[in-house]
């Protein structure tokens, strides 16, 4: 996943943290976990997980579901 940093460190730090969390969510999706299970593990709301997933789909380009996201992430070597 790509991101761009402005000249200011703070927005970049926030984006890096968001990107790391999205990768955590993506890995858990690949592990077959439900949105609810992911939310419980990461101690966030279900809505937050859904937002992360929508962000992931957008960043992976032309991805509209979990199966496509996992396949694309594997192509890009984003999953361990």
Image (cartoon, rainbow, N blue to C red):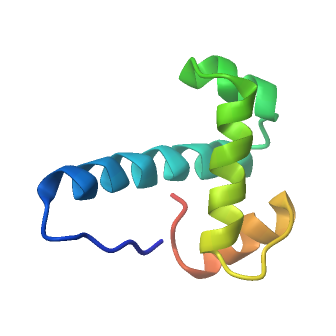
Q: How many marks?
A: 0
What residue lies at 43% left-to-right and 48% top-to-bottom? 18
Q: Position of residue 21 (x, y in %)?
A: 47, 43
- Residue drawn at (35%, 55%) of the image: 15
Relative placement, left or right, of 28 versus 68 is left
Image spot of residue 38 (x, y percent): 68, 30
Residue in front for this viewpoint, 4 or 78: 4
- Name which residue lies at 73% across and 64% down: 70
Residue 55's x, y, as percent? 63, 59
Depicted 56 relative to depicted 34: above or below: below
Picture layout, residue 1 above or below residue 23: below
- Where, by quadrant of the figure, is residue 48 drawn? top right
Look at the picture and state if 67 lies above or below 34.
Answer: below
Name the residue located 67 percent from the left edge and 22 percent from the top edge: 45
Above-or-below relation of 77 to 53: below
Q: Quadrant of the rendered structure where residue 74 is?
A: bottom right
Determine whether, in the image, residue 3 is placed left or right of residue 42: left
The answer to which of 77 and 5 lies nearer the viewer is 5
**Of 55 and 20, the residue lying toward us:** 55
Q: Quadrant of residue 39?
A: top right
């Amino acid at each position: 996943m790509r991101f761009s940093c402005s000249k200011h460190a703070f927005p970049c730090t926030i984006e890096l943290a968001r990107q790391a969390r999205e990768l955590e969510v993506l890995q858990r999706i690949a592990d077959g976990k439900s949105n609810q299970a992911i939310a419980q593990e990461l101690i966030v709301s279900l809505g937050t997980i859904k937002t992360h997933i929508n962000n992931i789909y957008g960043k992976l380009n032309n991805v509209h579901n979990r199966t496509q996201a996992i396949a694309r992430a594997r192509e890009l070597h984003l999953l361990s």
